[in-house]
Image (spheres, rainbow, N blue to C red):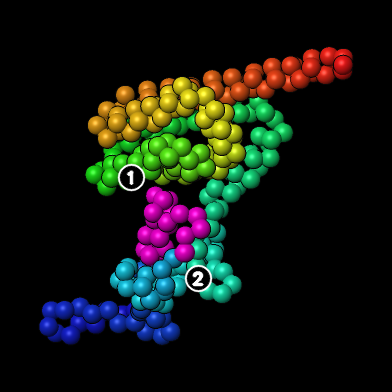
Amino acid sequence: MVLNYDGTGQTNLVFEGTMNPQRPAVTRLADSVASELEKRILEGSLKPGDRLPSERALALELGVSRPSLREAMQQLVSKGLLSTRHGGGTYVTDRLEAHFVDPWQGMLKANPMLHRDLLEVRQMLESQAAALAADRATDLDISRLDAAHAALEASYERDDLTHCIETDVAFHQAVAEASHNALIGHLTASLMRVIRGHVSNNLVHLHARPQRWNQLRAQHRAIWQAIREHKPQEAALAASEHIEFVRQSIEDKVLDEARRSSALRRLGDVPAN
């Protein structure tokens, strides 16, 4: 590279030899695009399993050339955050969750006492998430949380247990993402995947007990109201009390099953007529 003075007061950079003056700019642009896509994955606007828009549409949205976009996407493929599938399309992988979820699911099945530890972590995580959401949620976050709570309420109204399980998980994830803490959002998603069957069994247990079922419904409403009214302390308390209620419900379920087993054993001792 040499400096060329052209007599006009301007100093120009002149590249010599085999150096390509465009290469650094293309690389920096690809890095910038990769960072933008990675940010979307971290914040949850691009979720595991989501298919990215077409190359043409995404390049247009980001205002970059398709070669720069391809280079950026290849960076994320190399990191394991994106994957290409047979038949076309690029998708967000579940790498951020899979390394956590896969081993813990197996260990929870083999070690039931880990459920207590998991609930303690969930209590800390969700109370903090609710507090942060109450403090940081934007109008768009509140609208999304309103929709998540409305869907949960509709499940209660229809007494649709299957849909209630889905909307329960979605509501808690909406709270986590409204916290605007990327780690809380991804950890909550991971925990929900780990304990999905656990949540389902507990909701079945509570559904059979109308008073407890109504308490559960009221707890979700309390979390929702505290966040939308921007009351962090109330939101944290409501979330913590909810998880404590879940913990107690699980203990009750275990006791009920133990009593039922005991009763069945005694019934087996009764002589046949």
Residue at the location (60% across, 44% down)?
101
The residue that disc 1 covers is 147
User: Is 34 situated left or right of 93 in this image?
Assistant: left
Residue at the location (31% across, 41% down)?
146
- Is residue 24 positioned above or below 122 on the image? below
Q: Earlier in the sequence, mark 2 or mark 1?
A: 2
Principal SS element in the magenta part? helix
- Residue 127 visible? The answer is no
User: Is 82 situated left or right of 148 in this image?
Assistant: right
The residue that disc 2 covers is 89
Where residue 38 sits, quadrant-wise, is: bottom left
First to last magenta residue range:
31-51
Foreground pick, 80 / 218: 218
The location of residue 232, given as percent across then percent down, is 30, 28
Residue at the location (63% across, 28% down)?
114
Where residue 78 sits, quadrant-wise, is: bottom right
Q: Is residue 48 magenta?
A: yes
Mark 2 touches mark 1? (CB < 8 Å): no
User: Residues under labels 2 and 1: Cα distance?
Assistant: 30 Å
Q: Residue furthest front?
A: 273
SS at mark 1 in the image:
helix
Q: Amino acid at mark 2?
A: Gly
- Is residue 266 positioned above or below 228 on the image? above
Q: Is residue 42 magenta?
A: yes
The location of residue 39, given as percent across then percent down, is 39, 54
User: Is 178 situated left or right of 109 in this image?
Assistant: left
Q: Amino acid at mark 1?
A: Ala
- Quarter of the figure with the C terminus: top right
The location of residue 162, given as percent across then percent down, is 52, 42
The location of residue 142, given as percent across then percent down, is 28, 42
* Mark toward the viewer: 2 or 1: 1
